Amino acid sequence: MIIANNINKQFGKLKALDNVSITCNKGECIALIGPNGSGKTTFIKCILGMVVCDSGFITFNGKNILHNWQYRADIGYMPQIGRYPDNMTIGQVLDMMKDIRNKKDEQLDKDLINQFGLDKLLDKRMRTLSGGTRQKVSASLAFLFNPDVLILDEPTAGLDPVSSEILKAKIIAEKAKGKLIMITSHVLSELDDLVTQVIFMQEGKLCFHKSISELRTDTGEEKLSKAIASVMLKN
Amino acid sequence: MKKIVKYVIIDILRNKIVLAYTGFLLLLSFSIFNLEDNSAKGLLSLLNIILIIVPLVSILFSSIYVYNSAEFLELLVSQPLKRRTIWLSIFLGLACSLSFAFFIGVGIPVLIYELTGTGITMLVVGLLLSVIFVAIAMLATVKTRDKAKGIGVSILLWLYFSLLFDGLVLFLLFQFADYPLEKAMIGISAFNPIDLSRILVLLKMDVSALMGYTGAIFKDFFGTTAGLVISLMVLILWIVIPAWLSTRKFNRKDL
């Protein structure tokens, strides 16, 4: 569904992405793992077209994403740090997104809004929200339009345990519908029951892209956190 | 496109600076027209103040607004929208609200007190200047990532167009006083939208006699319909070129 081919991106002297090639298919749930500053977020932003890569190309459903914008209608993106216009209320942000995406009310997936209790906070201004509530807004927006692809950048960072369980349950439910889900996270124990594939990045390079069962047999570890630890030690 | 323009305008109205600007212009225009018994003289005073204030407010407000809506831009870019649409919508939202403010603040008093060719010329020129400086501000902000630097660049650009450029032109005139530069001055004035606007309005006022031989040359050129059309075209180019360059730059910008 998403094919990235030899992506390079340089920020000044820093090589953020170094010849990264990745193929992602429908129904997979992919964990993007790597140390801080290994290029995970940059790669995600490349897929979304927020960062324009220096060389290489990315196709989405067989179409090059360069100079294309319609494809983003099929992506739900939850940023690492959700930043929204300060003066707007939660309700206004939600309405604006619905307006921009041109979706009718029946097609919307409002599960998360209701489960997070955001429907009671609709009049709150974005600037007054705590970091966790912002994360809830970002998550609700990512799932709201029933997209085929979900890209979640550190989804549970800053969420309380109850909310992060709600979000995990929602991710599992969407995975069961055969959607492509891409998650970055540093809390590996959380990913255990979610992911089917693991992509490991380091210093902008792709180290490996394996299915989780392959990784388990290769390292002999059952838990993802231990498997990754043993891989990192070997390097 | 319409939707985003709508959200931008709602947002601009909400922060009340543009409303204050409208009120200030309105107060200024009415007091000037009431102080002078001859409204043509009032128009001249008003012109001098407008040529300073309109570019300053347009360029500063727009650049600060674009920097403050960095989050909004980021949010929109991850949605199924063309980058060009997003950028031009912000441009249109800013241009519409600032020129509307000018139209209410200066247009209404001018239409009441001085509904002449000169008054209308000044209105058109003021509206164009508002939009021109929005376009220049957006070009400055898209080129610089740092907020303080970007706003500094905007202020310097304003300073250049309102003061430094005239200084440079005077310097040139004195240095090359032995050569006939009068015709070249017409060309040089095209490089500064504020000067061009001033000349356009002053020539309508028939005070060109005060400007000596250069004034006569100017009258010869700008007084004709062709000259008027050409100078309006130049002003429109001052909108189109910065807007086009900044859109091109924004299309490739990393957010």
Image (spheres, rainbow, N blue to C red):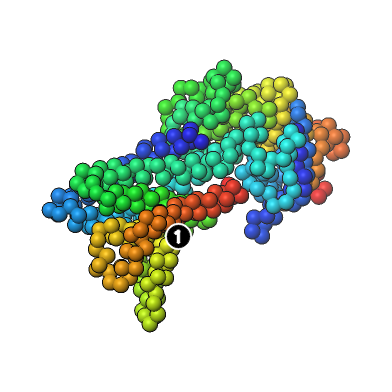
Classify residue A80 by image quadrant: top right
Residue in the foreground of this view, choosing between B171 and A151: B171
Q: Is residue B209 left or right of residue A134?
A: left
Tell me which corner region of the image, top left, top right, bottom left or bottom right, holds residue A190. top right
Q: Residue at x 46, y 37 (%)?
A: B5
Q: Answer above or below: position of A136 versus B72.
A: above
Quadrant of the snapshot with the N terminus of chain A: top right
Q: Position of residue A97 (x, y in %)?
A: 53, 30
Residue A154: image x %, image y %?
A: 63, 37
Residue A20 at what x, y percent from top left? 76, 47
Return the residue found at the far top. A106
Which residue is nearer to you in this view: A104 or B134?
Answer: B134
Q: What residue would you read off at disc 1? A: B153
- Does residue A224 appear in this view? no
A146 vs A68, nearest the viewer:
A68
Depth check: B6 or A41 in front? B6
For disc 1, the chain is B
Residue B244's place in the image compared with A26, above or below, is: below
Q: Is residue A178 visible?
A: yes
Question: Residue lying furthest left in this view?
Answer: B37
* Amino acid type at image mark 1: Val
Residue depicted at x 49% and y 30% = A96
Q: Is residue B140 left or right of residue A172?
A: left
Q: Return the x and y of residue A6 as percentages of the image width and height.
A: 77, 48
Label 1, residues with CA under 10 Å away: few <14, some 14-19, many ≥20? some
> What's the residue at 54%, 40% (across, down)?
B85
Q: Secondary structure at mark 1?
A: helix
Count of numbered circles on the image: 1
**Residue at 48 percent of width and 22 percent of height:** A119
